Amino acid sequence: MDVFRHLKRRPTLDLDDIQATVLRARPEPYFGTHAIIEITDQAAGKELLRRLAPRVPSAARWDEPRPSWLALAISYRGLVALGVPQASLDSFPANFRAGMAGRAERLRDTGPNAPEHWEAPFGGPAVHLAVTVYAANEADRRTEVTGYEQQLRGLPGVKLLSHQDFGANGFNVFGYRDGFSQPVVEGSGAEPLPGDGRPIKAGEFVLGYPSETGHPLAMPAPDVLGRNGTFVVFRKYHSHVAAFNRWLRDNGRTEQERELLAAKLVGRWRSGAPLALSPTGDDPALGEDPRRINDFDYADDPRGLKTPLGSHIRRMNPRDTKLEVLTDVNIRRVVRRSTSFGEPTTALSDDGADRGLDFIALGARAIDNVEFLQSEWVNSGNFVGLGKEKDPLISLQDTGAYFTVPGTPPRRVQGIQSFNTLRGGEYFFMPSLSAIRWLST
Ligand code: HEM
């Protein structure tokens, strides 16, 4: 699928100062690496930022293909390690300052998803910088990684804590096409495609511009640090694909029934074709077509007969679904830059391989929004009259949990499990290019 949206309007955002990743879609296929770095010496941390700054491209010409690029984000503890003045630290939102582990209760990250079970370095005090390389092929990934590693090497006072390669052909490890339903950012120059809805005010995604309320959201001080920046939510999931395959086998008699159940769970067939447009069978050509893949709403399906009310995409973006708890869905959107790691599998028993998804959400309200999504729309069903029923794909399931497929009669599919377990995560601030320079001096 052509993942590039075409720039048809004159951009009004300060694209030269915003990091590329905010507007630039992943290539398809994509390759890359996430690195987590600790700063043990303030001067070395600043020197590292000085060295990396020229490698972080801006969002200018974000619609044109590029072989590879780097994204840089800093945690609250990273800002402290860089010696950011207290008044400025205090101007960041409380949930960002607490960090993801500190917000576990609000995020419903309990039991096996709780921070005490996370992989190092997540949840610990040393997660300071996140550097991500996105590339269109393995050779360009390697070149970009070698480039930034050279800057790291020979710099005592900064330490590479973890390094994770990722990559996929546009499909995640469960075999679903993923990452293509995105909000259109007003002022980015993007022309909405059918079904994208109206562009959403830039201030929802980039600090310093009017938001959906008409005013810019509160911005960290000083202006040079906050403006043109955004927040990042990073959540590393381990995917239990064999358990998912077994659940489909146990609940569908034929391949056709199993694939329909897999589609009901997400709200889309594995090809990406939405159930809303193709309710009885997959339509791979529809899944390949960026002009049709998002061109639907739920107006003609109030009971969820086509797209279940509890399916993953209907929960995460209810569009025009009548909600029991009133919410403005336009302020709940995030830009997703998630990446898959490991190989998909059709096996029915766990092979012990490492596979999963690094969920990455960007936005001026990304932290508030993911906290809201996790507590209200992922781990509860009240907002669409489903009581305690949770998101069938990404929630922490209790024993005895089920997934409701509306119909006459409705079907309660038992045996649903936690198909994705949280292995770590953190809240980051993605500074503008001028803020990176400010932080490095
Ligand atoms: C392992 C974890 C996850 C998997 C496998 C997964 C899978 C998917 C898939 C297959 C889609 C449909 C394709 C698309 O619209 O791009 C999707 C959409 C989406 N997901 Fe997830 N997801 C995961 C985690 C999350 C989390 C943690 C959140 C938020 C808290 C989330 C929010 C969304 C949103 C907002 C959409 C777009 C819905 C729309 O606009 O219609 N996902 N996800």
Image: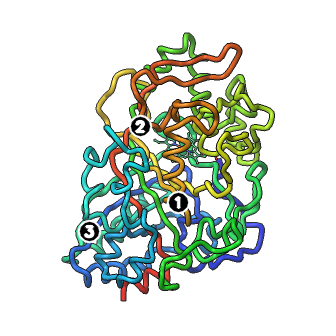
Tell whether 161 sits left or right of 330: left
Residue count near mark 3 (Cα–Cα under 10 Å), binned few <14, some 14–19, many ≥20: many
Q: Is mark 1 within 8 Å of ligand 1?
A: no
Residue 53 sits above or below residue 274 on the image? below
Task: Give the farthest residue toward the bottom.
Answer: 441
Residue count near mark 1 (Cα–Cα under 10 Å), binned few <14, some 14–19, many ≥20: many
Residue count near mark 2 (Cα–Cα under 10 Å), binned few <14, some 14–19, many ≥20: many
Residue 324 sits above or below residue 247 on the image? below
Q: Position of residue 356 (x, y in %)?
A: 40, 41
How far apart are labels 1 and 3 at the CA level? 23 Å
Mark 2 belongs to which amino acid? Asn
Where ligand 1 lies, by quadrant?
top right
Q: Quadrant of residue 228?
A: bottom right
The residue that label 2 is drawn on is 420
Count of numbered circles in the view: 3
Residue visible at 54% across and 55% down in the picture: 369
Mark nearer the N terminus (1 vs 3): 3
Q: Quadrant of residue 142?
A: bottom left
Q: Position of residue 392 (x, y in %)?
A: 51, 31
Q: Secondary structure at mark 2?
A: strand
How far apart are labels 2 and 3 at the CA level? 27 Å
The residue that label 1 is drawn on is 366
Residue 38 is marked as 3
Task: Give the farthest residue toward the top.
Answer: 253
